[in-house]
Amino acid sequence: MSYKHGMPLPSPCSRTVPPGPLLLVVIALLAHLAGCEPPPEAPTELSDLSRYLYREYNDEDERVMQAGARNMYDFLSTLDLEGERSDRSFEPEDLQDEDVADITRPDRPLENCLPLGIGGVSRHPIENHALLMIQPDQTEAEASANFYDRSFPETSDPTCFLDRTCDLIVTVNDAERQNLLLKVQFILFKNFRWVEILDEDGEHERWAIVARSWFEQEWEGESGENALLQSYASDLWFENDDGTVWRYQTLWSESRTTPAAEDNVVLGILRTSIDGSFGRADNAIDTLLE
């Protein structure tokens, strides 16, 4: 079944036909061919769900991502997203090869990555976040970025994303990041897509935006002593009835620093940086709307 703007298109699943053994067989065959079987059940455990959202991102059956986003929204509803950072951050399990099979990436062991997930809340509605996502200059929204330039190689008019006439936007990001550990310029591939969250009756409940990003290669710092070796991230934005947005990012990343930093130090810096980026995005939206 395919949805556009929340309205289901006619399909053999929804047709009324007279009963009968032969007709039931035909209906079952048509339903199978039309993709009317239920989508794979999305995991509820956080590590498995995080991997699922990354792995299934490009599944042609939009119900697959709907199920994953639904479960992540339900998980976030159990958290105090304005509470202590330590109470809304997590360390999921490693990605596996099958989770990244559809992207070009550095030839490095995935278990080398440090995993981190963190939730937060935005004071802006989801439409404002969509507007920010299509801006060519993302510097103000990105924590620890000296510059962050976004291009849209598959469309000449990314504003189609605002009203969901295009539900997927492909971006390429040329950026330089600097923090306490390193300074590195890199190219990041990041795609954004609208996902409709449905209620138990299959009716529209709310919209979400789900993003997936990755490096295609390793990125060395100017001195050669520091590097961003691999990075994979899943970002989610969920609209709420009160006009705010719930946010969640899962990041799996590997870097090299000189001198080498302990894993807990790196995770602490990443946790602070990601959490800070939520607030920076809100401030960037404030500026954009002025």
Image (cartoon, rainbow, N blue to C red):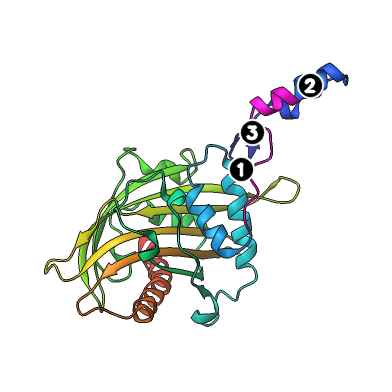
Q: Earlier in the sequence, mark 3 or mark 2?
A: 3
Question: Of 261 and 97, which appears nearest the observer?
Answer: 97
Residue 25: image tag: 2
Check residue 31 for magenta coloring: yes
Residue 288 placement: quadrant: bottom left
Q: Amino acid at mark 1?
A: Arg
Camera-nearest label, 3 or 2: 2
> Vertically, is 73 above or below 116?
above
Residue extending farthest left: 223
Query: Badge 3 is on which residue?
Result: 1
Q: Are marks 3 and 1 in contact (CB under 8 Å)?
A: yes
Q: CA distance from mark 3 to mark 1?
A: 8 Å
* Overall secondary structure of the magenta section: loop
Mark 1 burial class by Cα count in 10 Å: few <14, some 14-19, many 20+: many
Check residue 147 for magenta coloring: no
Span colored in magenta: 28-43
Residue 12 placement: quadrant: top right
Question: Of 199 and 69, which appears nearest the observer?
Answer: 69
Q: Secondary structure at mark 3?
A: loop
Residue extending farthest top: 22
Q: Secondary structure at mark 1?
A: helix
